Every structure is written in structure tokens, then in C-alpha cells.
Amino acid sequence: MKKVLSVLVLPLAATLAIIYISSCGFQSEPVAFVSATPSTGSTLQQNASITLTFDGEPTGLKVSAGTAITSGRNAIISGPFTPGPLALTLTWDDGSHVLNYTVEGEGRSTDPVTATPERGEVLFYTGEVWWITEAAAEREARTAITSLDSAPGGGIKSHLTHDEDEVKRWMLQTMHNRTVDVLVLYGDVPGTIYPPGNALPDGSVAEEWLETTDGDTILNHADWFFWGGGNGKNQEAGLQNIMDIPGITMWGQDTPMIVTNRGKALTPSLRNFSSDRPFHLDRLEGDWFAELILASNTGDERATRADPVIVRDGNLGRIAIVYQTQDEVNPKGTVAAEIIKNYLIK
């Protein structure tokens, strides 16, 4: 006798229902804790910061001590912490974890009469450049590093990187540390701190770093601040989003810059030159103001265009531009170092 194979045919509606039920039943993997810097078991200062890494974004993160700020897979916990043993409990929607530290009290610090105040750090990023070659950017960065190493008071810690992931890690680690830290760029911006195409107009690592009361500074050479290099990844909107000023721009090819009196005092290596992307001081809004004008189109503080200049968001972070020039040889590294050690990190 021949065996007959029976085939079950489901109506289309039933098939769609099965697919829908299957897709609705899908659950993403829970987010897990990966590491902490400094690692558990370490000794901390009262105002230290702890950087956490997860294998996904930890939604609903809460900590038993300090203040936590989450950025993607990373989070930073800032003190002050109470001196003594610290069992830092982390809780998030998918789990919990405990880190154990010892927090040093004021009694363990060195003699305040002879102690050197904590200084911020400087990071030079040359992984992406525009209006300057990578080789020239590295030369200028190393010139600045040499100058910072010999700054009065034991030098200023600085280093060079090509790794955009290191830039993000460094910014998360230096956020809320109560010292002025400086990131130096060369006409482009790493996508790890500000996603290309203005994909994250608010809440980027760069914006959060600038919106603390540390006074942290992003200093840019060569092309337009946050424009995004040759591909114009962000164009005008990059600067506009970072500053929350819709009308701010940096147009102005060959604008004469005359060194101001403060420029002569703080940056003795700076000379009159022509800027191709000066800052438009007359377009500042909100809490933004010109904190330090080193050269301007008028040679004084009444200017509408300036380069080099530092603008600041009230008592928060700073944006600095230094020699916004197209493929020109000028002492970028020397002047940047003078600004940093004579004004930003004294």
C-alpha cells in the first residue's frame, strides 16, 4: 500500500499570527558589567571619578554613592566620596554589581603648604586632520608637548593619540574631575565623541564634557570647529549643536587678525596673520561669552571676529580656536602651549 504524505496548509492569517507571536517573544540579551577604572580594591581620593564599562547601554543605572552619568556603554561616577571603606553598589535594569574601594580622607594628604595643586591633562588627537597634513599635525603636537613638559611647577601632563576610542575613554575619565583638561584637534573631530552627520545633536560625549563646571576646553587648529573634515560630516550644524546657537558660523576667508594686548602678554609667539575661519563674536548667544581674545579684526576687545580666542559657556566649558588657516605654516603648537600653560592650566 502506498503511503500518503500529508501536508498541513495554514491560512495566511494564521501564518502571520505565528510570525508575529514569534517576533514579540524575542528578548534582547541583558546588559552585563565589564570593568571599572580604577579597578575594585583600589584606593581613591575623595573627589575621584570612576569609569564603568558595560557590554551594552545600562538603562536605569543607579549608584549608592557619588553621581553617575551614562554615555552609551560607558558611565562615569564622580565624587565626593566619604573617607573610609566604600562598598559602591551599582544597580541597573538588568542587574547589579558591587565595587569595593578605600577612600582617603584629608588627614592622609600631603602637607598643604608644600603640596602641588592637582593639574589637568592635555590630549592631542591626530587620527583625523583637515587643512593640515597628519605629519605636520604631529610635529605641532610634539612641539606643544615638549613645551608643556617644561611648564613651571613640574610640567603639564600631555600625550598624543591616533585612536578615537582613546579620546572617548579619556574624556569620560576626565569628566567632573574638578580640573581643567584640554583636548586639541586638528581640523576634524573623532566620531566617538560626536557622531558624524550630526547623528546625536544633543547628549554627545563632547557636549557633556563641555557642560561640566570643570572648565574643560576643546582647542581646534586648521579648519572649522566640528565641521568634520574633507567630507563635511557635520558642516555648520556641528558647531551650532555643540553651542546650542543656531546661527553661529565661522566663515571669513583671509580675515586680518591683529594681536591684542592680552595676546602679546600671554602668547609672545603670536604674530599678526590672516584667519580663514575666525570666530564670530557678534553671534554669541545665551551664556556664551568671549573669555580671552588674543587676536582680532580690530586688535582689541571690541572685535566681531577673533582668532585665537577662547569662548566660554558661562561657568562651564570652553571652545578655543588657534590658527584657523588652510594649509599654512604657523606656530600652532607653540602658541597652543602658551595658551594652555599661561592661562588654562597654570
Image: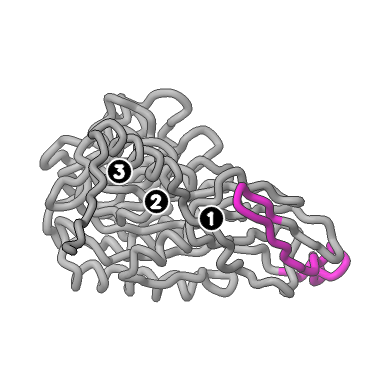
Query: Does the segment drawn in magenta span residue 112?
Result: yes
Q: Earlier in the sequence, mark 3 or mark 2?
A: 2
**Alpha carbon of mark 2 to alpha carbon of mark 1: how far?**
36 Å
Disc 2 secondary structure class: strand
120 or 172, nearer to the observer: 172
Residue denoted by label 3: 295
Q: Quadrant of the N terminus?
A: bottom left
Residue denoted by label 2: 218
Query: Does the segment drawn in magenta span residue 274?
Result: no
Q: Is residue 330 left or right of residue 289?
A: left
Q: Amino acid at mark 2?
A: Ile
**Circle 2 or circle 1, nearest the eye:** 1
**Circle 3 or circle 2, nearest the eye:** 2
State if disc 1 and disc 3 touch (CB < 8 Å).
no
**Alpha carbon of mark 3 to alpha carbon of mark 2: how far?**
18 Å
Disc 1 secondary structure class: loop
Instruction: Identify the residue at horizontal 35%, vertical 71% (top origin).
Output: 161
Residue 30: which disc? 1
27 or 15, nearer to the observer: 15
Q: Amino acid at mark 3?
A: Ala
Q: Give, as a single range, the part of the protein colored magenta.
A: 90-115
Disc 3 secondary structure class: strand
Q: Is residue 209 visible?
A: yes
**Circle 3 or circle 1, nearest the eye:** 1
Name the image quarter holding residue 269: bottom left
Q: Is residue 93 left or right of residue 149?
A: right
Callout 2 environment at 10 Å: few (<14), some (14 to 19), or many (20+)?
Answer: many
Say if 83 sits above or below 194 in the image: below
